Amino acid sequence: MVISGRAGVGKTRLADECLEWASAGGHPTERVAGSLATAMLPLGAVAGLLAGGFGRLGPHGDIDPAALFDETRRALRDRHEGRRVVTVADDVSQLDAASLTLIQHLAAQGTVFLVATVRTGESVPDLVTDMLRGGGLERIDLADLSRAQLETLLHLALGGPTGASAARQFWDITAGNPLYVRELVLGALESGALVERSGVWQLEGRLSSTDRLLDLVEQRIGGLSPAARSVVERLALCQPLELSYVEELAPSDVLGSLERAGLITISDAQVRLAHPLHGEVVRGAMPKLRVRKILLEEAERLEAASPASGPAPLQIAVWRLDAGGRPDPAMLVRGAQLARYAHDFRVVRRLVEAVPLSERDPVAALLLGEALYELGEFQASEEVLAAGQELPASEQVALRLSVTRSKNANWGLCRPQDALAVNARAKAVIKAPALVDELAADEAAILMFSGYPGQSLAVLDRIAGDDLRTRVVRAIVGAAALAVTGRTAEAVSTAEVGYAEHAALGDELAIAHPATHVVNQVFALTEAGRLAEAEQLARAGADVVASLRIPIAQIWFAANLGRVATLQGRMATARRYFAEASGLAEANHFAGPRRMALSGLALAHAMLGDARAAAEVLREREAVPEFGFLGPEQQLADAWTAVSSRQPVLAAELLRDAASQAASTMHLVGESWLLHDLVRACRQDTSARLSELAAACDSPLVAARARHAAAARTGNARELAGAADDFEALGAMLLAAEAAVGAAEAWSRAGERRAASAALRRSQALAKVCEGATTPALFHAAAHEPLSGRERDVAMLAAEGMSSKDIADRLHLSVRTVDNHLQRAYSKLGVTSRADLARTLGTSS
């Protein structure tokens, strides 16, 4: 067989694995490798096959090929008792003609089984072509890894998942080439750019090439002619370039050779390097004066050919800066605006900071302040924006400075009162109706994301204008506020329309990325219980923002994927996404979103039964400032940590307090979650309020929670089974499993053994997809009869080795009551001691 593929895809590795496999199976093996050195010596590469030396010499002292080949064939047959020799011929295109002829002869005679490798772009020897035509050779084409394969490889190699942004960067730079991936991972680990946070690998620095990788790429381009090298260098610095222009730089045969070698691609009349990594290596190896010369040449060419109003100023400004020049401040600010429209805030910052401080106007301050916010430098952003507000500016620029500064205060510095004060000062000076409306939307955003969705909606309702930008910014906050207050269908629609209108609005300063509407749509779908739709949309959105490297959007997509997974009952998946969100937030200094992510992470640990890990995350959260967005929901982490620590009384108190807070701030869907968890974790009746919430909200998830709570209160087996159906239809498998357990217990109490067994089997099947979730409602062990909630609490604590007195103190019961509950649990479980109880329940005593 022949293995074909580009350099680095694993041809040699696959061939050598075949060789090892053959050797392990008892087959004789040989290996030959082509190279520039062996190509100069006839038969030098196959010396190992020439068991008898070079055979008899001809009449003139030369080698007799026919005799040599025949003698080699017989020697191999005798040495290996007639068994074929599995022979790897690596880089077969580099073998000399005599070696190729010998291998072909031995293969044709059945003496060797050939495994050859050929690099894409190199000429294929006649040996390979002839054998392919004759059907004696099987061809295997190795391609680079797909995105999914690359992420799997990273997970296996690193021993844990890789964050979406890190995985995307590896993909963008390596295009799935396994060898390049390996070297970049090693370089990133060595440099400290690739770090593990809460079990998820994140890139927090620039990817570094290893010396081996530099050598490998240089081998690909080291033999280029001066004309070809010049083209590659110019592309490495300034790609893409117009085909017509490149044809002026180099003859067509040079371009043809580069294309055949797989070094450049030509598409839509533009020329690019075929592999991103080649550009990195070429740039790193170029002398600085050569870099400067090319960049200035290209800047001058583009400046002469392009209008000042087009996209060229960004490229010109960057090239002149890279060349060490001092571009005109107006060009730098114009280039920064173009970079901002592309959401490349790193370039925005670089360009504006190159403008002398004395020459920065309010627009420059706005651009730099927003870029610093997006890059997580909140105090610096506050200083720049505050200084910008001291400069004379139009009402429009003054408004945008204000809304950016308030966003930085609320989201970055976690100071919502400061954000409201900034907004109030702007109201005193801004009078244009459309701008006043946007200020109102900004106030609503501060209220919504500091924990007051009800007040936020009241402010939004006062906005009367219909300006397009106002509608877009209103949709950003409105969709989220509608979702948490139970108007989920309206929230989904608002997010969809907001995204479309944002696209129609075009490029604007001081406004969130259009992906924010997608985040809101995911959030609204989740609150509605449309979990599969939410997950699909979130995955697509996460991929987009990872490619753009927008930190806050990446954090929100990861956190929303964690929320979706939590509601689906996939707790290990939820733990992975919350860990990613937490790591991204920490790396980019977003304390508020990090607090939310840590709450989700602790919740996931607790629901997986790891009380210690959950408590550690909560201790970590203590060092993070309070953050009001979904504040009541964040307390689920505290309550479930208490549940997993066998403190049901504390858990119930925490859930009740959080539900009360949710009710007072209009977090209606969150209130339903908290009250339903009181049913699940503490077996407390909250059905009346949940029924009210189901009537006030349009969310099927809230309705399912209410149905389950009502059925649990009455012990109605059919209604509990119906609630399990509702949850399963929504994709909430853990809740469905718990409802099915309740149905099994109710059937059992009614003496319906067959129905109880069926419900229990259903629960077990549903629980299997919940990735190890451990909740009180799933506890049924091997009981012949279901344990009551209190019997279950006592049994679990006793199984952990607690004395009856300690259990009584923990549960606020008398010792006698504890012992009575314990004896009933023993009877139902068929055990006689705490040790038996521990073994039965799978805990340590």
Image (spheres, rainbow, N blue to C red):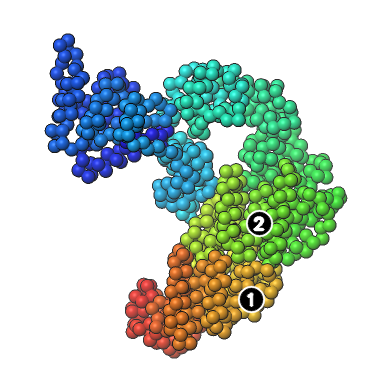
Quarter of the picture containing the C terminus is: bottom left
Q: Nearer the viewer, residue 621 or 641?
A: 641
| Left or right, 413 with reference to 257 | right
How crowded pointer 1 is (Cα within 10 Å; few <14, some 14-19, many 20+) is rated as: many
- Residue 754, image x and y in percent? 43, 82
Residue wearing tag 2 = 520
Residue at 24 percent across and 27 percent down: it is 105
Residue 22 in view (yes/no): yes
Inspect the image, locate mark 2, and give the three-letter code of the amino acid beneath it: Asn
| Left or right, 532 with reference to 113 | right
Label 1 SS: helix
| Left or right, 203 with reference to 591 | left
Residue 239 in view (yes/no): no
Residue at 75 percent across and 63 percent down: it is 457
Residue 639 found in image quarter:
bottom right
Residue wearing tag 1 = 690
Label 2 SS: helix
Q: Nearer the viewer, residue 213 or 589?
A: 213
Earlier sequence position, callout 1 versus callout 2: 2
Quarter of the picture containing the N terminus is: top left
Instruction: Determine whether 741 is above or below 300 in the image.
Output: below
Q: Are marks 1 and 2 in contact (CB under 8 Å)?
A: no
